[in-house]
Amino acid sequence: MTDLAARLSAIDSRIADAAHRAGRDPADITRIVVTKFHPASLVRELHALGVREAGENRQQELSAKQGELAELTDLRWHFIGQAQTNKAGAIRRSADAVHSVDRDRLADALHRAADDDQLLDVLVQINLTDDAGRGGVAPGDAETLAEHVLTLPSLRLRGVMAVAPLDEEPASAFARLRDVADRVRAVEPSATWISAGMTGDYAEAIAAGATHLRIGSAITGPRPDRG
Ligand SMILES: *Cc1c(COP(=O)(O)O)cnc(C)c1O
């Protein structure tokens, strides 16, 4: 077994353990492998190991890898980074889901970029910090943004996404996210995704109800030097 295969299966058993501890079915949890800064060849290896969900946080890197691996038609790409409105078209062409919709204008731009009947899955990103400069909408504004997304017929509102703040216990941050998720689900009952949990806090995210984990370095190994 390669190191990559060993890390992937180790993380998957830890995810299953955390799910069982939380009284949840591991089958209800989607593990997205975040491949940022790693070459397309690593994504290809992951695909050969059964990975079907990959995450990227920069548009150019997403577009390049998706283009290079276009023949892997069952691989789903998740865009998880802050998005500039003028990159919305490029993001839409490469991504199957965008986790980081944090303002009306970005939702509008993603909608305008639709060029076929395919719906784009989107999540409203929630800022769990006190720093308004971080990505995400304030928790109190989540429903208003969700309602706006629902007016855009080429977008399918799936739920909410967040990154836990560095200066807070992830469990308490994810409990707040859970509240926001419940409120968004009251607006749109099919918006059931909670995208939360990274290498350092996925067990806490699972305990708080996360449905989509975004795990990078624990699976891929350390990210290569960006130079
Ligand atoms: C990089 C990144 C991740 C994965 O981080 P790891 O700590 O390597 O698991 C998850 N979510 C977002 C938004 C990221 O940018």
Image (cartoon, rainbow, N blue to C red):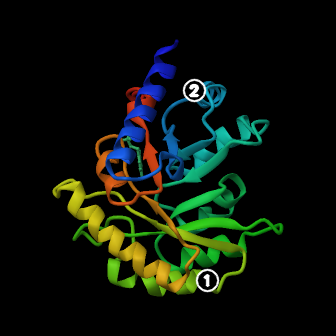
What residue do we see at 46% from left, 16% from top? 3
Q: Which mark is residue 42?
A: 2
Q: Is residue 124 above or below residue 93?
A: below
Identity of the residue drawn at 52% across and 53% down: 28
Question: Upstream in the sequence, badge 2 or badge 1?
Answer: 2
Left or right: 48 in relation to 162: right
Residue name at image x 35 percent, y 69 percent: 178
Alpha-carbon neighbours of circle 2 within 10 Å: few (<14), some, or many (≥20)? few
Task: Establish if 195 lies above or below 226.
Answer: below
Displayed quadrant of residue 118: bottom right
- The reply to whether residue 9 is visible in this rendering is yes
- Label 2 and label 1: CA atoms lie apart by 36 Å
Residue tagged 1:
150
Q: Nearer the viewer, residue 174 or 20?
A: 20
Q: Nearer the viewer, mark 2 or mark 1?
A: 1
Relative image position of residue 14 (x, y in whole percent)? 37, 35
**What residue is at 57 percent from the left and 43 percent from the top?**
54
